[in-house]
Every structure is written in structure tokens, then in C-alpha cells.
Image (cartoon, helix red, strand yellow):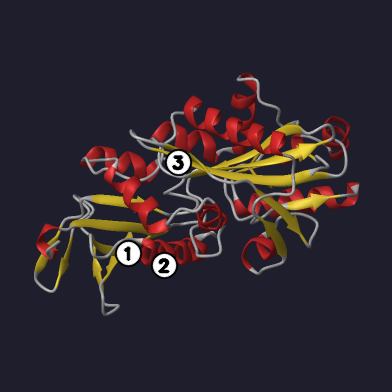
Amino acid sequence: MEKENKRIIAIAAGGDSSEHDVSMRSAAGIYSFLDHERYEVYIIEIHAKHWEAILDNETRVPVDRNDFSFDNHGRHIQPDYCYITIHGTPGENGILQGYFDLIGMPYSTCSVLVEALTYDKFTLNNYMRSLGMSVADSMLIRQGHADEVSDTDIIKRIGLPCFVKPASGGSSFGTTKVKTPEALRPAINLALDEGEDVMVEAFMDGTELTCGCYKTKQASHVFPVTEVVPENEFFDYDAKYNGQVAEITPARISDNLTERVQRLTSTIYDLLHCHGIIRIDYIITKGDHINLLEINTTPGMTPTSFIPQQVRAAGLDIKDVMTEIIEDSF
């Protein structure tokens, strides 16, 4: 395919949260996965009002936010499609999706509504509970109102140990496993430093699993299930990105439980009208009871991330998966 006939793919990365650098690593992974014989690919780093396209020689040029275009040594580049890999705002909460809807550019993730819903963990949990899903009990503490609820009230309602985390965000930034009453308030303050609202969530003792999925007009793919065994108290930043975890694909669970997790993943995908690749995290408690933990609509995409691992375990080629997702929009 001649260069002038190639679709131009932009990979939107960076963002305005603590996950900026993680997102850039995912962008590098996606860049390496894409079929460069078929596509002309650029990484666009977004940070606040600074939107820059990274050219082949690492030169950076400004992106025109009127139409997401930029100049490549005198050649006007207008992307045909955007693969969004921003973890956090504005790529995981619907803001960037709304922008692309306005300018008429297809993109890789779910819609504005689904992104906003899944980004707010407290709202998501309560919505999914209304659909019959099992989720941990939780309560919300809003910024500026933390003193209106006492530690005693929180512990009486949620119990110990518990997790204190920003209601919106990822990569476990600002997340603490609280075991004692004395540790509760510092954990709340830490989470408030990361986000506007804090979710205090009941601890579920069990096995953590994660399962990826994507669907197109022609096909449905639910990946093998991965078992997550962190060395630390929970699946924190070091476990996710510094190797302090065992990630076992396929998970060491029964065929029956595997099938149930995969079927539930597919059902949730359809219930929410998801698009592109998602990854759903679960906790399996006593009696093989499946509890929903989190829905990731822009999962990590470095070569060692869960999704590329699961793609390989499924016997698929990540380049073909990327092509299938992109071409589904045309």
C-alpha cells in the first residue's frame, strides 16, 4: 500500500493525571504493534493545552485542536482515526471522546457515557450492582466534606481492612490498604491529593483475576483469564509496573470458573455497549463467587501488559487485533 493511500493513525497518549508516563509507555507499545505497512502512525502527546505530534526524527510539532491536524515538514497531516491510550483524564473519562465526536473522528474506545461511567469507580459499582453484579460495599467521601464523616462511622459501615482510593483514576495512585483505625485518615488525605472524591471500599479476600475482551461487527473475542498474584499487600503501582507480581495466564482455576468469568466479561461488554478492547478485573471469593472489581476501558498496552499477554495466550497476533479494531470503524 503506497504511503499516500495509507490510513493515518494517531495514538493519543499522555494526559493530565499521574498516569501520564504510563500512558506514554502504552503508546510506544501500540506504535510497535501496529501494521506500518498498512498505516502511517504518529504518537500525539497531550498534556493540558499542549498537544504535540511526535515525528519520525523525534521532532515535535503543535497539533491544531480545531481538527486534530498537524504539519510534517510542509505536509498537512489529517489523521483518519485515533487510538486513545490515555490512562486517566482526558482520555479515560469521556472528555477526549466528546472532542472526537464533535470533529467527526473515529476512535478506539467506548463512548462518552461509558467512559465517564467506568472512570468513576463509585458510580460504576452502584450502577453494576443495579444490574445484578456482585461488588464490594463502599462509601463516597467528597473533597471538602471529609470531616463530616467520622473514622468510627466509616469503620462501622465498611469494616477493616478496607481500601481507600481516589474514586477516579488508575494505576493504584493514591490507593491504600488500611488495616488500623489510625491509618484511615492519612489514607483519605492521600487519596484526596490524587482526586476530588474518595471511595472507601470493603476488603474482599480472594483470588484476583482479569479478563480482556473486544468485539467488532464480524467477531467477538474474549481472551484467556489471567490470575494476578502480587508480592505486596495488593496490586499496587510496583506490582503493575515494576514486576512485583506473578501474572499467570491462563489462570489456575477450574474450567467451569474460567468459562463463567469469560461469559460475564462478554455480557458486561454488551450491557455497557463497549467498543474496542476492555479489561475487567474480578475478585473470586469463597465458593467461586465472582465479584466485579473494576472495568478498564483503556487498558495498559506495553508488551508486558495483561492484554498483550492474553492476546498471545489466545494464539492471536496483536498486529492483527489492532488492525481488526481500527478497520471496524470504516
Residue 100, image x, y percentages: 28, 43
User: What numbered label is drawn on residue 28?
Assistant: 2
In the image, which is nearer the foreground, mark 2 or mark 3?
Answer: 3
Residue, disc 3? 214
Question: Which amino acid type is shown beneath numbered disc 1?
Answer: Ile
Q: Residue furthest bottom?
A: 57
Q: Which residue occupies the foreground of this view, 51 or 319?
A: 319
Q: Which residue occupies the foreground of this view, 82 or 71?
A: 82
Q: CA distance from mark 1 to mark 3?
A: 23 Å
**Could you tell me which secondary element the residue under label 2 belongs to?**
helix
Residue, disc 1? 43
Q: Which residue occupies the foreground of this view, 19 or 220?
A: 220
Q: Specify which label sits upstream in the sequence, 2 or 1.
A: 2
In the picture, which quadrant includes the N terminus? Answer: bottom left
The answer to whether residue 140 shows anywhere in this view is: no
Q: Specify which label sits upstream in the sequence, 2 or 3.
A: 2
